[in-house]
Amino acid sequence: MEKQSRRSVPSWIWDFAGQHRPQYVLSVLSAVCGVVCGILPYFVMAGIISDLLGGCRDMSIYIKNCLVMAVLWLGHCGFHSISTTLSHKATFAVLGTIRKRVCAKLSRVPLGTVLDIPSGSIKNVLVERIDSIETTMAHIIPEFTSNLLVPIALLVYLFILDWRMALAVLATVPIGFGCYALMTRDYEESYQNTINKTKILNDTAVEYINGIEVIKAFGKAQSSYDKFVVAAKEGASCYVEWMRRCNIYFCLAMSIFPATMIAVLPIGGLLFRAGTLDAGTFIQVILFSVGLIAPLITVMSYGDDLAKLSTIIGEVTSLLTLEDMKRPDTSASQPQSKDIKLKDVTFGYHEKEVLHGINLEIREGTVNALVGPSGSGKSTIARLVASLWDVSGGSITLGGVDIRKLTQEDYHRYIAYVSQDNFLFDTTVMENIRMGKQNATDAEVMEAAKACGCHAFILGLENGYDTVVGGAGGHLSGGERQRIAIARAMLKNAPIIILDEATAFTDPENEAMIQSAVAKLTKGKTLIVIAHRLSTITNSDQIFVVEDGKIRTSGTHEELLAQDELYAQMWRSHISVRDTVEGGAQE
């Protein structure tokens, strides 16, 4: 991984090109041919002028030369079109591949690593940053290469014609480059500033949109909007200020570079008058000096993109070089049972350790509950078992096999995980449930929904199972989203089911229905439940009490009531709250 992070930008571009490299090679060759076709008319014009000076009056020769120039012009346009078509087709395919690689990468890295990166920043990389590579791969690779090679060849030809006039052609280049250098002064710092301000704007926009309900509920619309406005203004002003500083130098560079005649005409005139330069050579130099600068300006126009390239590639590859979870490409062996065992497991977020030597065993086909105060580590244990993170120390085994020796695909076949805040995709209810089992029929999806008590409310939606749930399931209530998520997990029919506060958003009536459905659907399976409502886990085969990142004690409900004061206190609190709520409801 460290070796990958030190790879050069050209190495990454070559890697991204992949199987499309032959298309880029053909694109470069076509671009070279196009530029050559654009330069050759200057030679033809030089010949025409020489014939005129020589007194040639044969119109057929001039007509023929004009036709040749027309053909060359058509060739220039044709080869340019072929080049850009090849490079763009290849590039858009490559951009799609890069996005797939980033998404696949995010699925292989620990969940904590992904959560540490603001969602606005990830969106920025997946959309804007990857799109920024399009200019490099579709334009710079063919056009920069061709527009640089041909002027070099033409310049060599000018030196062969007359080295003095070749130097005269280049007289304005140092001044133009000087202005260009002043324009790019502090470039990296300025560009990084725009990157930072854009990230802040993206993150603020995502925060504003995601928190709009809280903003409205607490009357914070103005202050939150002001924060967004400040971020938007700073995101725009950093570009405006940067462009304002560069404008004068850019205008000078673009005015001085093409002004080759300032040196060519007086120097050529003096040499011609002195008899050391013939008229034909003088005319050729005049024509070629014009043809030489145009491709160089094209090359310079990509200087901005080249200067950005290192930062852009760095943004993209910062995700591609994240450290994967420790999983093999093929499983060393397969579990012999569905027993789960955590041995001396430690885990920490960044530098802070939150689990300290967890030891517990979950037997196949049993119902197990994790209870404890908020922040004690229950959900962290569940996520480690679900292989969303890697342990910092110790091991988790399934059927005697360390889960780090199983491929992600093999292990995930054993696990169905439902969190308290499940995500639904912006597609139909049918497709959201079907994600539990991609090849499930509509009938199987409906059966899973019926078993989880979802069928009735789904039929009540606008388009039934074909109702689009909106971004993150936003068109549904929290309880409805939760029940669809449970149906999705049940459709998967995995032997191990993890429910992390799976009924947190449901009302008592629906909770009882879901509990009954889950009990039927998980019969004979291994069930791990995290619950704050202790009445829902009293029949568990084993209850683990978690406190401060450690397993305090374990046993059945009756055993814990008799032996563990923390559990007994939690139970009394739960019963008191439940009785109060039920009493209030009756009144």
Image (cartoon, rainbow, N blue to C red):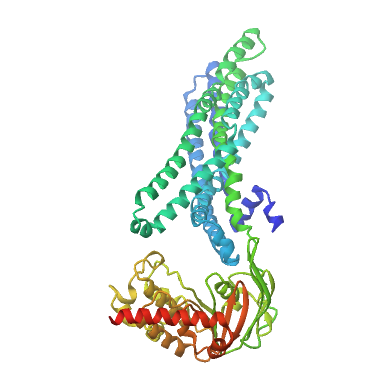
Residue 55: image location, x then y, percent: 53, 16
Residue at 56% x, 61% y is 114
Q: Is residue 497 above or below residue 374?
A: below
Q: Is residue 330 left or right of residue 123?
A: right
Figure check: 474 above or below 5: below
Q: Nearer the viewer, residue 581 or 276?
A: 581
Q: 250 and 532: which one is in front? A: 532
Up/down of 474 relative to 125, above or below: below
* Quadrant of the frame with the C terminus: bottom left
Quadrant position of residue 236:
top left
Residue displayed at 46% across by 79% down: 573
Give the side of residue 243 with respect to residue 155, left or right: left
- The quarter of the picture where residue 145 lies is top right
Residue 54 visible from this viewpoint: no
Is 244 in front, or is 80? Answer: 244
Check the picture and name the quadrant holding the N terminus: bottom right
- How many numbered markers are drawn? 0
User: Residue 51's x, y, as percent?
Assistant: 54, 20
Q: How far across and down, in percent of the image, does residue 283 sit?
A: 57, 19
In the picture, residue 405 is in which quadrant?
Answer: bottom right
What is the residue that sits farthest to the right in this orientation? 3
**Image point 55% across, 56% down: which residue?**
94
Q: Identify whether 162 is placed above or below 101.
A: above
Residue 476 location, x and y as percent?
35, 70
